[in-house]
Image: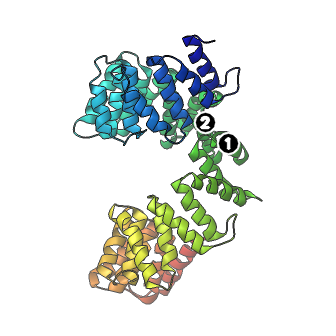
Amino acid sequence: MGNDNACLELSRLYSKGAKIEKNLDVAIDWAKKAPKDKESLITIFDLLLERNKEDDCNAAFSMLVSSDYKQDPDIALRIARAYERGIGVDKNIDAAIELISRIDNETPDVLMMKADLLVKRHSGGDLEDSFNIYADLASLGNSEAIGRLARAYSRGTGVIKDLDKAISYYQIAADAGVRWARNELFDILMESRVPDNSVRAIEVIKPSVDANDPYAIGRMARSYRDGRGVERDLEKAVELYKQAGDRVVWAKRELADLYIRRNSKGDSKEAFLIYSELAKNGDAESFGSLARCFRYGRGVKKDIVQSIEYYKKASDAGIPWAKTELFDILMTSELSNDHVFAVNTIEGAAEAGEPYAMGRMGRAYRDGRGVNKDLDKAVDWMSKAMDKNVPWAASELVYILLERGTRADLKRAFDIANQGSKNNDYRCMLVLGEMYASGMYVKKDPDKAIEWINLGEKLRK
């Protein structure tokens, strides 16, 4: 068993758990006993990354960059991937692209990675260059490149967005067995909201579900949860989410979300435990979900202090809805410092165009909480929120305009309330009823007031 090939063969057996219990430590030890050639270096590098113990990534990167084979395409690809992902070295896309560009033998794998890196950098003509590489490889029948061509058309990266072409190319890649292409085709078909497409999406994803692809299983769970392409079945959705959940973070999180929605006995507690596990692993969305659990007492005793702490963690991690919900909690406080913090929490998101943050900035300026009261700024922010279709923004803008009270404001308030009422916005119906009841801008009309208020109350229920 001491010959060189036997060392790598034993390493493979231990790494795959084939005919013997999987043990990465032993697999690495056997690989290290083999001669330091290209094959053994690649084997050790891949195993170190899989084991991912402290210093494994640094050791893996240092081993490759100091080897005599660093110009070999397979080795260079791994070094470039390390730069791309920050494995054992600071993340540096430019360094990865430079390294890939120096490889003389431009194999399909080398060209594919170069194009992928160009998409990640996306400066200058990077996206167009990446598209051309994918198109060249796709013309040679490369199914991975065909899938990436589909992705380019679906997102409009390097080419004009064309969903029909995207679907066509995704289908070709999916038929060629590219699993991620099946998943992304499923997503596009489901997003189209065309009923027949949801049925087609299920047919697309089935082979990957049967092949135990966790990402496909998670998508099938969504279908049963929402009743799209299949009959709605929450129990089936839970079962599928459980199959996918241990391997796919978003599926595990959506399982917890489904428990909260279903709200059967024990569901809230199960959801809380899942969110807690995910949060321990740094999942930002789960910080926000734990905040909601503590806020509303779902699966845990209600604790506003704990809720605020988790909202802060989620906000710091960039979760938009956590920022707005933290704002709402802090604005109920009697402490002015909390109001200032609340405004600071959402201001950046509002300036970046987040609709609900815009509406809350309007409320802050309307009420003078966390900022000096300024109805002009309140109108400006609430108008932006209304234009972004925030449901409550139109009616709240009407009240702000009525408070500011210029003749132009009163006319605009009536026009907004009237149009909103025609669009079945119950909030606008209620405020329109108030305008008719009090004679603000319009002639006082008790009958119309009662009519609009009754309609609004009916729709609100």
Q: How many marks?
A: 2
Q: Nearer the viewer, residue 301 or 206?
A: 301
| Disc with the residue nearer the chain's start (1 vs 2) | 2
**Separation of marks 1 and 2 at Cα, in angstroms:** 21 Å
Q: Residue at x 58, y 10 (%)?
A: 3
Q: Nearer the viewer, residue 332 or 309?
A: 309
Picture disc at residue 214? 2
Residue located beneath label 1 in the image: 231
Q: Would you place residue 150 above or below residue 359 in this image?
A: above
Q: Say few, some or many: other residues with alpha carbon within 10 Å of mark 1 (under 14 / 14 to 19 / 20 or more).
A: few
Return the x and y of residue 303 as percentages of the image width and height. Answer: 63, 73
Q: Secondary structure at mark 2?
A: helix
Give the position of the N terminus as an image quadrant.
Answer: top right
Image-quadrant location for residue 412: bottom left
Side (left or right) of 200 relative to 82: right
Residue type, mark 1 in image: Glu
Q: Residue at x 43, y 74 (%)?
A: 342
Residue type, mark 2 in image: Pro
